[in-house]
Amino acid sequence: MVNLSDSGFTPEQTSYLSGFVSGILQGRELPFLGQDGERRFTHEPDQSVYGTPLEDLCKEERIKHEQNGLDCWDAIIANAATNEFPKDGDVFRYKFHGLFFVSPAQESLMLRCRIAGGALTSEQLRGLAGVAEKWGPGHADLTTRANVQIREIMPENAPNVLMALTDMGLTSQGSGADNIRNITASPTTGFDPDELIDVMPYARAMHHYILKNRDLYGLPRKFNISYDSGGRVSVCADTNDIGFYAVKVGENDKGIAPGIYFRMQLCGITGHKQFATDCGVLLTPAETIPVAAALIRVFIENGDRTNRKKARLKYLVDDWGFEKTLEETQKKLAFPMRYFPLEDCAPSLPKSKHGHLGIHQQSDGKHYIGVLTPVGRMSVQQMLALADVADEFGRSEIRLTVWQNLIIPGIPEEKLQAAITAIQATGLDHRNNAITGGLIACTGSRGCKYAAADTKGNAITLGNHLASKMILDQPVNIHLTGCHHSCAQHYIGDIGMMGTRVKVSDGSTVDGYNIVLGGGVDDTQAIAREIWNGVAFEEIPGLVEKLLCTYLAQRENDESFAAFAQRLSVEELRGLVDERAAA
């Protein structure tokens, strides 16, 4: 304990500082005012949060106002000592550290990591396998944000899990709650022969900027940022709040120097049936970080903190329009944003729909192998084996994709067959299956309280059924999501399904889905239309089988399934499957 009596302070100062230091040592919280991370010595409580009166705040905003989520480490430690789950507001605050109490689906915590650009070293993959083996269920899940989740963690192990992440050079800070989620990047960036620029340095810079700026935590709602390198493999950047698309600008009469820039697209939120829209802004690569930070701060100061359903960036821009939003963003910048017509940029290349799977040549002459991990789940043994493959045959790196699969880059031609053999020995496959290669599922009811159906189990059943019945000559993406939050982005699937409970004859309910058709992203951008509502899952394998067989029989030339579905009316699509036509 510091002896303040010998410090030269006045008696009044000594008395104050003694109480202050004692309060800190006892873990007392000082008043937290505002959302900017400042702690102030005042007895006057703040009566609003960015102008919203306290009494008007929604529940989550009141929780954040009482204590910033980043400051709940003491609660994590205390609950670990007694092996107790978080209670009340701490359930929400734990998410600031990437820990989710998923009761009643599971009486355990789920860890969501934060992996910049989806790039992992082989040692980090081994470290995550160690966490899953020692404190988790023996497996990990790849997500649609090129991320990793590990479930079944008990409270007593939460501090060990978070410290282990730090030791391996990873973090989970801000991966949940009202924060900026994992920064995604084209998974082949840096070795894609068709890309315009390596975007990984900018994704990593954005990642670290967020980590180092406390005021960027506690937004009105979550926020997504993505970088597209202009290459052939999609990162679904147009589904993000901010999507940065690399473009090439040639000679022009607008005073813009030729070169590689980024277009800024805003307000992608496909769960609300909206893609990001180009806002006319053209940025150099280095300008993307400060512009994103400025826009996020505008959102923090002006987003809705009373209604969670209206608290995403989309709704602020809907209210203000692009012009005012960009004007307010400009006020926070030390340089002027430039505007340039989209049509004066060189057109982007079309994406390779399943280019993240199979064997592909890199820009340096080596190859990457895209590995199919069914609905994103990998066992500890598979994780360790893939890390060994990356070390022995590649460059000790793994790239995660937003398609719940992974890529092992840097494999020389002479090592390809050995690498393929080693991958297949894990029980996984690199071959691009047109059906199972595009099968995506969120956590589902086995691990998420919001989900109405067992999406991962249903997806595996559906995929196995279809693979045993047919061979498609074009890839079809099938997305199963458990609820309206649309973590599996069902509206962008060729075939999308959202879980619902369906009542059967005995009065009980079973897994079911509302089915949408004809979605896509990037150069095939489209929001799928709902065709069937409340279909019990046991009917779905046969329904989808007949739908795909009819597509093969009736398509025009080499028409894709999405184009086929978009060409027909809702009534015509229903009529393709007779037994459901009258539904």
Image (cartoon, rainbow, N blue to C red):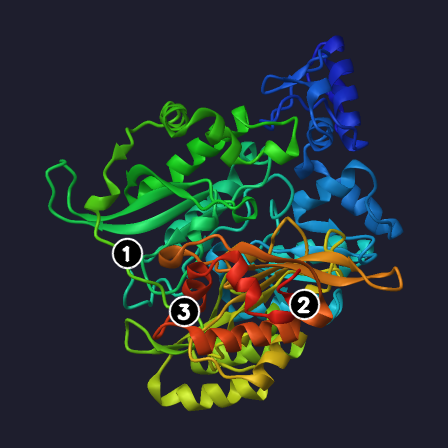
Residue 343 lies, with reference to residue 444, above or below; the image says: above
Q: Residue at x 33, y 58 (%)?
A: 198
Are the residues tagged 2 and 3 within 8 Å (C-beta)? Answer: no
SS assignment at label 1: loop
- Picture disc at residue 307: none
Relative placement, left or right, of 238 versus 35 is left
Which of pointers 3 and 1 indicates the residue nearer the eye?
Answer: 3
Mark 3 lies on residue: 560
| Label located before the other in sequence (3 or 1) | 1
Please tell me how crowded label 3 is: few (under 14), some (14-19), or many (20+) other residues with Cα within 10 Å. some
Which of pointers 2 and 3 indicates the residue nearer the eye?
Answer: 3
| Label located before the other in sequence (1 or 2) | 1
Mark 2 lies on residue: 456
| Label located before the other in sequence (2 or 3) | 2
Are the residues tagged 1 and 2 within 8 Å (C-beta)? Answer: no
SS assignment at label 2: helix
Q: Residue at x 51, y 35 (%)?
A: 313
Please tell me how crowded label 1 is: few (under 14), some (14-19), or many (20+) other residues with Cα within 10 Å. some
Most foreground residue, 232 or 361: 232
Q: Residue at x 62, y 64 (%)?
A: 581
